[in-house]
Amino acid sequence: MHIRNYNYKPLAALAAILAVAMAIAGAAHAQPLTKIRYTLDWRYEGHFAMFMMAKAKGYYEREGLDVTLDSGAGSVASINRIVGGSHDIANADLSTVIEFLGNNPAMAGKFQAVYLLYNRSPMIIQALKKSGIRKPQDLAGKKMAGPIFDSTRKAFPIYARAIGIDPKSVTWLNVDPALRENLLARGDADAISGFELDKLTLMARGVKEEDIVTFSYADAGLKLYSNVILASSKLIAEDPKAVAAFLRATNRALIDTIADPEEAIKYLKVFDPLADPKTGLEKLKILLRVINTDFAQRNGLGAIIKADVENQVEDVTAAFGLKTKPSADQIFNSGFLPPKSERIPRSASK
């Protein structure tokens, strides 16, 4: 991990914490650490604070791993990094994974999902009241904006079927993620795709919360698992203990982040010195709503229900007309999860 030299005292303090954690972890392991290259599916932002904390506080090192944590550029990029061999572990949206495997059946042996991050979909559509859009069905015939790789946009045909409109009735504008909210605020788009935390971005553009209309995919009755952790089949075959160790450390970080988000967000500036911790904390707390759910309390973090994955495969196959239909067992491997007792979230301490 590389830290740029900013004249910023809090950053220096965090760098010192990181150095101490690394020194302790290094002393604890007589054997060389196993190198793991891990990619997020987006930039270093507050909602990924749990992974940054796991790296900075030495959670991975204590499991015998030397993890490189890279920023990402969307789920498709994450999948390509795994398939291309540049990374061992990645974050990606499950529907995007299903679409990729369905259209590229020869790739079915390249990776598997090993941990469910978001057990409730954070996907939303945002519009402004002044557009006249009041209910989901009003999206028919409208102009919507989103990056072509955006998982919410890619899953829109599934949502459209659920609300009873033709997905082809919507005209999509291909935009850079940084411009999406600007287009909506200016009225150049009627609605935009995104995650629940993107509402903060729209409000930062000067839009008042009361002027925003939000439609949640989950509220439409869609049981769509969202982000998962993928492991390359090469790593699974050659070092299954490293996969299990990675999940133990990551699971611990998720448990600790749910219990104390304010502690986790401290490590955001280690990876992005220019980040705003206040905004980062707001994003983190929003995303924790799709991680720390009743489902997680019953089943534990990371777990799936196989029938839910099978139903999601059916939905994605129908919406995208996939060439083949991957099986749930091809997609998800639960064999590396920590025991359920270690995956039950603790209540937030603050």
Image: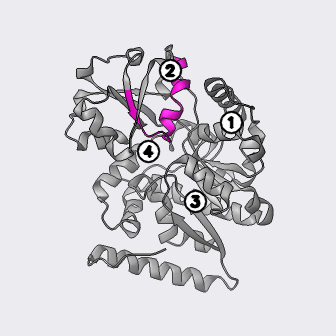
For badge 4, the amino acid type reads Leu
Q: Earlier in the sequence, mark 2 or mark 4?
A: 2
Q: Earlier in the sequence, mark 3 or mark 1?
A: 3
Question: What is the quadrant of residue 146 in the picture?
Answer: top left
Q: Do residues under tags 1 and 2 come within 8 Å of each other at their CB atoms?
A: no
Indicate which label's residue lies in the foreground, 1 or 2: 2
Q: Do residues under tags 3 and 4 come within 8 Å of each other at their CB atoms?
A: no
Find disc 4 in the rendering and name its residue: 287
Which is nearer the eye, 18 or 175?
A: 175
Indicate which label's residue lies in the foreground, 2 or 4: 2
Mark number, residue 167: 2
Find disc 1 in the rendering and name its residue: 305
| Cα–Cα gap, marks 4 and 1 | 21 Å
Asked if residue 287 is positioned above or below residue 314 in the image, the reply reads: below
- The answer to whether residue 231 is magenta is no
Residue 300: give x, y in percent of width and height.
Answer: 61, 45
Residue 198 visible in the current orientation: yes
| Cα–Cα gap, marks 3 and 4 | 16 Å
Find disc 3 in the rendering and name its residue: 250
Q: Secondary structure at mark 2?
A: helix
220 sits to left or right of 60: left
Which is nearer the eye, 279 or 83?
A: 83
Q: Do residues under tags 2 and 4 come within 8 Å of each other at their CB atoms?
A: no
For badge 3, the amino acid type reads Thr
For badge 1, the amino acid type reads Ile
| Cα–Cα gap, marks 3 and 1 | 20 Å
Question: What is the quadrant of residue 203 in the picture?
Answer: top left
Which residues are the magenta region? 144-162
Residue 333: give x, y in percent of width and height.
Answer: 74, 47
Indicate which label's residue lies in the foreground, 3 or 2: 2
